[in-house]
Amino acid sequence: MFKWLEKNLPKIVMAPAVGLIGWFVYGFVLWTLYISFTNSKILPKYELWGFGQYEKLWASRKWLIAVDNLLIFTALFLIFCVVIGIILAIFLDQKIRAEGLLRTIYLYPMALSFIVTGTAWKWILNPTLGIQKMFRDWGFENFTFDWLVDREMAIYTIVIAGVWQSAGFVMALFLAGLRSVEDEIVKAAKIDGASEWDITRFIRLPLIKPIIFLVIIFRSIDTLKIFDLVWGITGGGPGISTEVVQTYSYRMAFGFLEMSKSMTVMVIFSMVVFTLILIYSKFEGKSDE
């Protein structure tokens, strides 16, 4: 008895924690999946309704706008983060003075939460408080920068804030990649007459392709966590012009009390996250080989 207890003591100690994790994580994942196939409102109903919520969701204009906005944000966010990150990394890789100070300045936004960043940029972009007012106070009476209240341009204010916060981190990853290139390769290229631009373009950048791919995957996952940023800057407005998947799900659950529809969004959302994780895992497996 004592031998059995001594042998299985770790399992016995861990069993309650494993059970709780299984119930509160995986149990509720399965519950969310089940509720998405019902017609629940504020309280759950357990009669199955088939794919009715999914059909209603994809027939909803608001949902399609939210998906379009998330895709626009993701595309522009990734492009600008990668481009600005590479430019800053190449700039700092020139062994310039005050590199440590500049690196700190570029990385500082990463220390802020999305809700703080969103609130700050809401003030900066507010036509009556921020950039527009500042330029008009300087004498540029006709200067206009009212993207925050423009239904067509408001989504781009979120892109600006997101890139401002994340580009520094991307720069740090690219800088580490550029400096991991072996000096012998660079010296050999210089002996052959290659310019600094040619070395960067044809040697350094191709060698950091794996890092570029990882940056795209990691930043893509970050775009799925922009609820705070959108809520802090526009709250999904003006109207629903900056509504994204995350804010749409929140409104369905707590604004319109459409529990099933919100759960349906979360199921689709989870499938996207799971797909990104699979892509990353496959890439990591190939890298290890």
Image (tube, grey):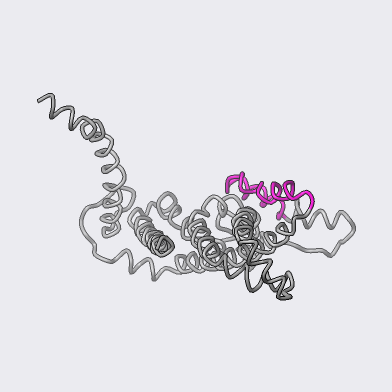
Q: Quadrant of residue 37?
A: bottom left
Residue 48 position by quadrant: bottom left
Magenta stretch, main secondary structure, is helix
Query: In what quadrant of the picture does the C terminus appear?
Result: bottom left
Instruction: Please tell me which residue is depicted at 75% across the width and 55% down the height of the picture.
Output: 95
Outermost residue, right direction?
A: 139
Residue appearing at x 38%, y 66% in the figure: 57
In the image, residue 116 lies in the stretch drawn in magenta: yes
Please determine whether, in this image, residue 134 is positioned above or below residue 116.
Answer: below
The one of 17 and 232 positioned closer to us in this rendering: 17
Residue lying at the far left in this picture: please name it: 1
Please report the residue visible at 39 percent of the width from the left and 71 percent of the height from the top: 59
The front one of 158 and 272 is: 272
Residue 6 is situated, as x and y percent measured from the top left of the image, at: 18, 27
On the question of residue 159 being in view, the answer is: no
Whether 186 is drawn above or below 165: the answer is below
Residue 30 % position (x, y): 26, 52
Provide the residue span drawn in magenta: 97-126
In percent of width and height, residue 267 lies at: 35, 59
Q: Is residue 255 magenta?
A: no
As drawn, the residue found furthest toward the top would be 2
